[in-house]
Image (cartoon, rainbow, N blue to C red):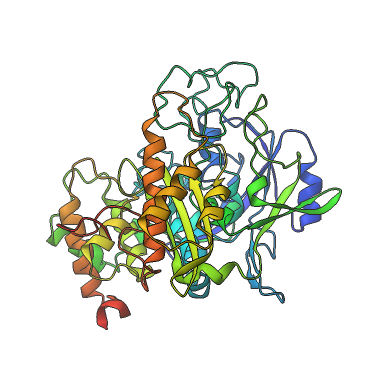
Amino acid sequence: MSMSVTFTINRAARTVELDDPRVTLLDLLRERLDLAGTKKGCDRGQCGACTILLNGRRVNACLALAISHDGAEILTIEGLAEGDALHPVQAAFIEHDALQCGFCTPGQIMSAVGLIGEGEAGLDPERVREGMSGNLCRCGAYRGITEAVVAATQAMGAAGQEDAA
Amino acid sequence: MNRFDYVRPRTIAEALSAAAQPGSAYLAAGTNLIDLMKIGVARPARLVDLNHLPGLDAIEGLPDGGLRLGAQVRNATLARDAGFARRFPAVAEALLAGASAQLRNAATVGGNILQRTRCAYFQDPDSACNRREPGSGCDARDGENRLHAVLGWSDACIATHPSDFCVPLVALDAVVEIEGSDGAREVPLRNFHLLPGTTPERESVLAPGELVVALRLPPGADRFAAHARYVKLRERTSYAFALVSAAAGLHVEEGRIVEARLALGGVAARPWRAEAAEIALAGAIPDAAAFRRAAELALAEARPSGENGFKIELARRIAVRALSLAASGTPTRLPALPASPFASSAGGLHD
């Protein structure tokens, strides 16, 4: 059975022929669309390395069947920068040295973009840490990651009403 | 992962018809099912995808004052719904204490109640597990079992139900709406999950092919909103399943408890409603002695199923903590670490 599925990926329309319903969004991106920025860590929804924005919400791409998300809008790490201009979260990760080996970084950054969009953590490091707990970093760069997310939140003017009050 | 047929129904009738074929499974978000398929624990011949069915993702107030949660409502959507969180704060707190933000954005109301146990032996196809393969035995009995059940377990199975969400829902008398080829029916959530007995492979009252379409909170379930908490102890403070948890709701008038609700998580194959404790609390002054008495009653029948005797006293203390926090009032904003008994800031003892 072959099924044609359509996505908007990083603002471009993509149609894919799926000959097998077992393909996850993660494998679709990495193996079929040459978008290998999204990483495969555990492949079981435990590490967060595969985090993407699916219809604007951060999810684990490894646990989502591509066929089930026909019609979805997807944003990956490759679609974050505007030309040569880094997204504020990307810039903050560099500024705050929020990585060592870098393997978890695309997932961390996409998760942070999702978190800031949710608008609930604000500038509170404790809420940022809790909000980022779905992304593991084996190098232990958590301190830098937390600082970067707080700084990016501030830079984006998205601290939320709780903190503005 | 095994090969399977994929079916995308457009109506509930089409879904029921597609799932009538033996070996079918419904696909909601797949955060649990796809994981189990990857490790060979679930091997459905056919997936019936619920994600393109209209009408299952609404949060609806009902004319009688109850609230209906469609089975495809996402956990994060529900937790962030301001009206819902105001009326059912312990449910919102339980939702936010579960899994990670990524999983909460995907996981659904219906999938949550139907998630499978995280017993390591259930999840390992090379281990004996009566729940996964009836009659094969239970490697958990003599294995790593410090996380396992202390209530309602049997010689055949000592697994626990892992949901946080279900714990306050059981305390609030939530009802499960089910559709099947023979029509619709409803079952109280507290009776939905089955204790293992000699048939641990039967995990719920659902018959093959039946579909959970909604959960309902009955009218008046929000009368505990001013005094409602969920407390969850984990081996790490975020993104982990409960060692033990408790949902408490109190209706307090003039310094006395008019009515109490208490349910425990992480202790049994279903969310555990502590009715004897609730009866003892009715009419009592909400103080430490009353809460300790209630906790003793809640765990009166508990016994270790392995190296987990510590969970019994831990569950008592978490119940006392949940009741005490509920008595002091629902916070206007959830703490930074929802449901955590530990500090959210350096130097503090707890929230």
Foreground: B186 or B18?
B186
Would you identify the image quadrant in which residue A147 lies? bottom left
Could you tell me residue A24's position as x and y percent?
51, 44
Could you tell me residue A93's position as x and y percent?
19, 59
Q: Relative to B161, is B277 above or below?
A: below
Q: Quadrant of the C terminus of chain B?
A: bottom left
Residue B159 appearing in the image: yes
Answer left or right for B154 relative to B247.
right
Foreground: B189 or B261?
B261
Could you tell me residue B163's position as x and y percent?
51, 46
| Residue farthest toward the bottom in the current orientation of the protein | A165
Foreground: B26 or B173?
B173
Would you identify the image quadrant in which residue A120 lies? bottom left
| Residue farthest toward the right in the current orientation of the protein | B182
Q: Residue at x 63, y 57 (%)?
A: B173
Residue A51 appearing in the image: no
Answer left or right for B164 relative to B6.
left
Q: Residue at x 25, y 64 (%)?
A: A89
Answer left or right for A158 relative to A98.
right
Q: Residue at x 69, y 73 (%)?
A: B62
Q: Quadrant of the N terminus of chain B?
A: top right
How many numbered marks does the figure carry? 0
Q: Relative to B27, is B83 above or below?
A: below
Could you tell me residue B53's position as x and y percent?
69, 59
